[in-house]
Amino acid sequence: MYSFPDNFLWGTATASYQIEGAVSEDGRGRSIWDTFCHTPGKVFHGDTGDIACDHYHLWRQDVELMARLGLNSYRFSVAWPRVQPDGAGPFNQAGLDFYRRLLDYLAEHGIAAAVTLYHWDLPQALQDAGGWTNRDTAGRFADYAQEVVRRLGDGVRLWTTLNEPWVSAHLGYGNGIHAPGVADLSSAYRAAHHLLLGHGLAARAVRSVMAPGSSVGITLSLSPARPASGSAADVEAAARVDGYANRWFLDPVLRGEYPEDLAGLLRPLVGEDHVRPDDLATVQAPVDFLGVNYYFCQTVAAAQGAPLPGDQPFPDFLRAWGRPSPAVPVTGKGWPIEPEGLTQLLTRIDTEYGHLPLYVTENGAAFPDYVGPDGAVNDPERTEYLDRHLKAAHDAIAAGADLRGYFCWSLLDNFEWADGYSQRFGLVWVDFKTRERIPKSSALWYAGVVSRNGLLPGE
Ligand code: FCB
């Protein structure tokens, strides 16, 4: 039996724009994702989050579903434009009331809440003033975060400032695959800095008002970077990708500095005028925990000669290609399945960045699920994926990491950003015509893991 520590949090994760729908109800303002989805050609199939899983109306049934699965925690995000429509100025009581009711109902069912304050749905009004490339957005975010915590405070176990600032900066402002759709390296690094600054300001602001028993941290997307071969060129390319994907965020948050190897490469390209002298001390605000989102490793080759088909382009300045081994199986989204990367990541953070409490705030996989003739959704690939990753998490605990919880991405099939509804990550199937929910076989398996607080060896 692979037993997990006492009081381990077992949950699922979601994000506001991916599940809520109700984009024009009860005073919600517009977000950059509303604009992006309604711009032709941006999202697969022209899908939008206008209705999504209709969680804004079906939240009671979703909480009851979690309770039936025996989950003891739930990670969700607050939609900034639902509670502060223009990202500055007045708050919208109806929006706050929605989250208050949700928190109360979770508490009634003994489910601890982990609340993300920013999972990418920036108010459009702030984007109109430059969004995250504008330094002012960092201050706006801290003000919003503090007010939300003041008003919703009770009953939240974990407050997370940002979800995956790497994705916000690089997909939102670097290659434009995500909202707001800007494709410019310099904008990506300005955005990354202001996101980090916003995190630091918000972490302090939240701490000053949060209820006893709450903690505050940040969630980062992290990917171990491995050289595709033992050649010096590949090893160096992997180190650059590690700087880009991991250390650019871990180092400022936990050490108060940017990694000099990557900073040296970037300086001539993007300048540093957006970084002010005291900023990094602000970014390094004390955090009570780190949230880790893990999906895959990066296998990196030095860019030389002609790219092979399938080489994923990193920004040119990295002179690196992503070259996963064809022998590694992939999920429905094409992401390599490498559970040992999770062990490596958690133990690395523990040894290199201090023995701080860790949560896996996201991990999961999309597969082309379908409803069988008997009405059931059987997804053994997802069960196997989760089983292997949970064993990998257990290995990290055995090696000393202070891992305190695991949130499977996701509770429900939902709006998967630029992929629209084409990628199903849920433990629970959603019919996007009727909004019916059907727990998949992986959900029932996960419920068993939670009830035993561990995995059976043969599973
Ligand atoms: C992460 C996001 C989450 C979801 C998963 C699949 O990067 O945080 O919203 O889209 O990927």
Image (tube, rainbow, N blue to C red):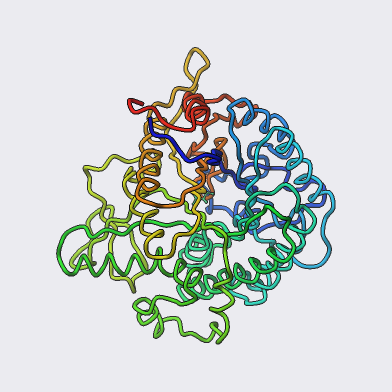
Q: Position of residue 236 (x, y in %)?
A: 24, 70
Residue beneath the point at 33% across and 42% down: 337
Query: Closest to the observer: 208 or 95?
Result: 208
Most extreme residue toward the left is 231
Q: Is residue 153 left or right of residue 418?
A: right
Quadrant (top left, top right, bottom left, bottom right) of the C terminus = top left
Name the quarter where the N terminus is drawn: top left
- Nearest the viewer among 86 and 308 is 86
Name the residue furthest top: 374
Q: Which x, y percent locates residue 321?
A: 28, 62
At which x and y percent is residue 455?
41, 30
Q: Residue at x 77, y 62 (%)?
A: 147
Q: Residue 181 at x, y = what percent?
A: 54, 62
Q: Looking at the image, which is closer to me, 171 or 48?
A: 171
- 293 or 135, which is in the foreground? 293
Q: Residue at 35% of width from left, 37% of height from top?
A: 388
In screen coordinates, is 175 left or right of 274? Answer: left
Eyeballing the image, is 198 above or below 405?
A: below
Q: On the picture, is 443 further left or further right than 117?
A: left
Q: Quadrant of residue 199?
A: bottom right
Q: How many marks?
A: 0
